[in-house]
Amino acid sequence: MPKQKVIIIGAGLSGSLLAIYLVKRGIGTDIYESRGDMRKEKMSAGRSINLALSDRGIAALREVGMDEYMLSEAVPMHGRMIHAIDGQTKLLPYSGRQGEYINSISRAGLNIALMNEAEKYEGVRFYFNQKCFDLDCKTGEAILENTETSERKVVKGNTLIAADGTGSAIRNAMLHGVPRFNYSQQYLEYGYKELHIPPNKNGGFLMEKNALHIWARRAFMMIALPNFDGSFTCTLFLAHNGENSFEQLTDEKSLMKFFETNFADAIPLMPTLTEDFFANPIGNLGTIKCFPWNVGGKSLLLGDSAHAVVPFYGQGMNCAFEDCRVLDQLIEKHGTDWETVFVEYGGLRKENTDAIADMAEENFYEMRDAVANPIFVRKRELETKLEQTFSDYFSKYSMVTFREDLPYSAAMKKGNAQDKLLMEICAKVDNVNEIDLSEVVEKIKTL
Ligand SMILES: Cc1cc2nc3c(=O)[nH]c(=O)nc-3n(C[C@H](O)[C@H](O)[C@H](O)COP(=O)(O)OP(=O)(O)OC[C@H]3O[C@@H](n4cnc5c(N)ncnc54)[C@H](O)[C@@H]3O)c2cc1C
């Protein structure tokens, strides 16, 4: 049996992946999850059914030998399919290079595969219906309650890692138990609701399969990601209150009028629109930043519990997987000297998770407004041409999404400078063919 035992709170995406990383280093884990076992119970509808998996996440899956299997279950998305208000569509590739695309993957499918893989090892044990509600920051003991019997118990390992997501109970305990604990939570005025496009009669796709579909309408937008079974999961992002908001869509008549005005081409594809809209919950969108992430060597926050981001760069899970990867590298370096590992981990990661949080928020405005802006569309065309022509040119999106070797903070710094320059160039021309690509690349080198 492993000599060390780590308590993990949360058997979601990062908790399950982390268990595999740790056991491969000979460290046992007990994982406590508040929900039932999703392999036996149906997950509630309407909560981010699929996710975009990209290179940072794939890199972590590769390290635990899960990348090929997971990619075989995913649908590649080569670009954004823009749906104009008149129903016209246009594909904007994510990258000008071959092989650079993102993958739509089932959240439940991925989570189940990670749990199954972790459970193959003797040192890994999952405990379900165990809700953590406190951490004693002095002793490192976590207090759990069985959600079926209300029975309470106290658990303690060599250390504890919180992977309990946005509403983290461990972070909440640190807020009260750690002196000078910095914490901020910023909600967008927008919420989201999931909707559904079924497969066609033959199980095929009703729209282009290999794309992330976007209906950008300035003050709001809808996106759709393909599922393996031929369906699409749509997410409508809309203000909570005011003009064009969830608050105004109170009955079938107002909903249909809103869709006829804004998403007319999607209506024939959505036979259960009304049922789905009124059955599915409205989710909140927010950014959480906090620090420090550790209590000495007793505990560490990881994934969304440390840094929840809005989903507009498709990076929350990818970033949480990168967390596991970085932590594993530090365990390789320092062994189970947990305090040293956690302090160095926080020092390395914080700047990068702040960067992806900021870029994700900015990308919301880009996807919502800029995709419908002709200068931005020309800029995307220019970026694609640059990527096709110069193998060492990467747009900000490509640096974040396809450069697992580049920290998020470096991608943000370089990407922002490039974006400013390219927007200035594209504002001066009507057609990107008028632009001298070599001249642009030379200018980028001087930034
Ligand atoms: C609408 C939407 C779309 C998204 N799209 C993408 C995308 O395309 N690409 C991407 O990379 N990311 C995306 N994300 C972000 C991604 O879902 C998260 O970043 C990712 O799930 C974080 O993983 P995690 O393990 O930290 O947390 P979670 O996956 O949330 O797991 C937390 C686990 O802890 C459990 N838990 C919670 N509280 C307790 C407790 N008190 N005690 C015990 N267990 C507890 C939960 O039940 C859960 O199983 C999206 C998010 C949303 C909301």
Image (cartoon, grey):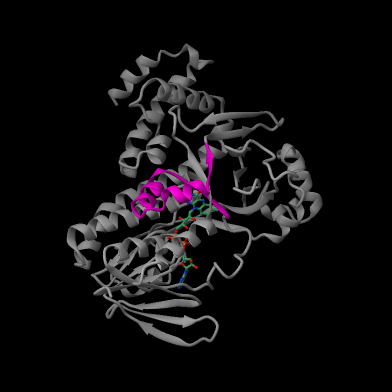
Q: Position of residue 229 (x, y in %)?
A: 63, 49
| Quadrant in the picture for the N terminus | bottom left
Question: Would you place residue 437 above or below residue 260 in this image?
Answer: above
Between 272 and 184, the one nearer to me in the picture: 272
Compared across the picture, whether 333 is left or right of 229 comes to: left
In reply to whether residue 321 is colored magenta, the answer given is: no
- Which residue sits at x=75%, y=52%? 272
Q: Quadrant of residue 120?
A: bottom left
Range covered by the magenta-colored residues: 49-77
Q: Position of residue 224 (x, y in %)?
A: 61, 44
- Which residue sits at x=32%, y=43%? 409
Can the viewer see residue 370 in this picture? yes
Can the viewer see residue 293 in this picture? no
Q: Position of residue 422 (x, y in %)?
A: 42, 24
Question: Would you place residue 179 above or below residue 182 in this image?
Answer: below
Q: Position of residue 399 (x, y in %)?
A: 37, 37
- Which residue sits at x=66%, y=50%? 242
- Which residue sits at x=33%, y=26%? 392
